[in-house]
Image: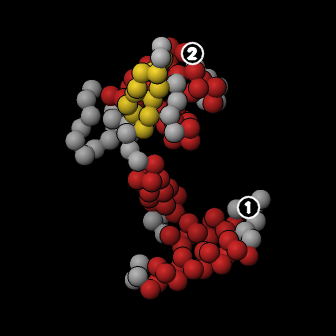
Amino acid sequence: MGRRKGKVDPLSRRERQIMDIVYRRGRASVGEVLEDIPDPPSYSAVRALLRVLEDKGHLRHEREGPRYVYLPTVDPRRARGSALRHLVNTFFGGSATETVAALLDVKGDELSREDLDELGALIERAREEGR
């Protein structure tokens, strides 16, 4: 199954977990994925999933001594934007206002005065730019 031009195949739950690990680490071997993945499958299952993620166009690998190290093919900023759009559309009906309101309501994440000032400045900049 080769990569389709301009389109990336959707991910299963396990594939998403692996991609989260690779993005968080920046690069990861099979062993490192096994260290971080919840309820880890076998070594060979992780290796197979990494190969599937390569086939889907999400990862590439480099040889590092005797092992392969996997890296994302999509820049983290672009992936973050895509994931955020998906989250906003899926859980907040496409509403940025509802998304921000939910973030402000998250318990345990107290925002400092500086955080609130920075958010206010970002909102003001967006308003000036007509966004």
Quadrant of the image containing the C terminus: bottom left
Q: Can residue 93 be seen from the camera position used here? A: yes
Relative to 82, is 8 above or below? Answer: above
Mark 1 and mark 2 residues within 8 Å of each other at the beta carbon: no
Residue 106 image offset from top left, x and y in percent = 70, 62
* Residue in the image at 39% along x and 33% along y: 59
Snapshot quadrant of residue 10: top left
* Residue closest to the eye, 32 or 10: 32
* Residue in the image at 52% along x and 83% along y: 124
Give the structural element (helix, strand or loop) at label 2: loop
* Residue closest to the eye, 24 or 95: 24
Disc 1: which residue:
109
Give the structural element (helix, strand or loop) at label 1: loop
Quick one: which residue is furthest to the bottom in this view? 128
Q: Amino acid at mark 2?
A: Ser
Q: Answer left or right for 40 relative to 60.
A: right
Q: Can residue 90 be seen from the camera position used here? A: no
Disc 2: which residue:
42
Q: Answer left or right for 40 relative to 79.
A: right
Q: Which of disc 2 and disc 1 is earlier in sequence? A: 2
Q: Answer left or right for 82 relative to 124.
A: left
* Residue closest to the eye, 125 or 90: 125
Relative to 56, is 74 above or below? Answer: below
Relative to 78, is 73 above or below? Answer: above
Q: Amino acid at mark 1?
A: Asp
Residue 40 image offset from top left, x and y in percent = 61, 23
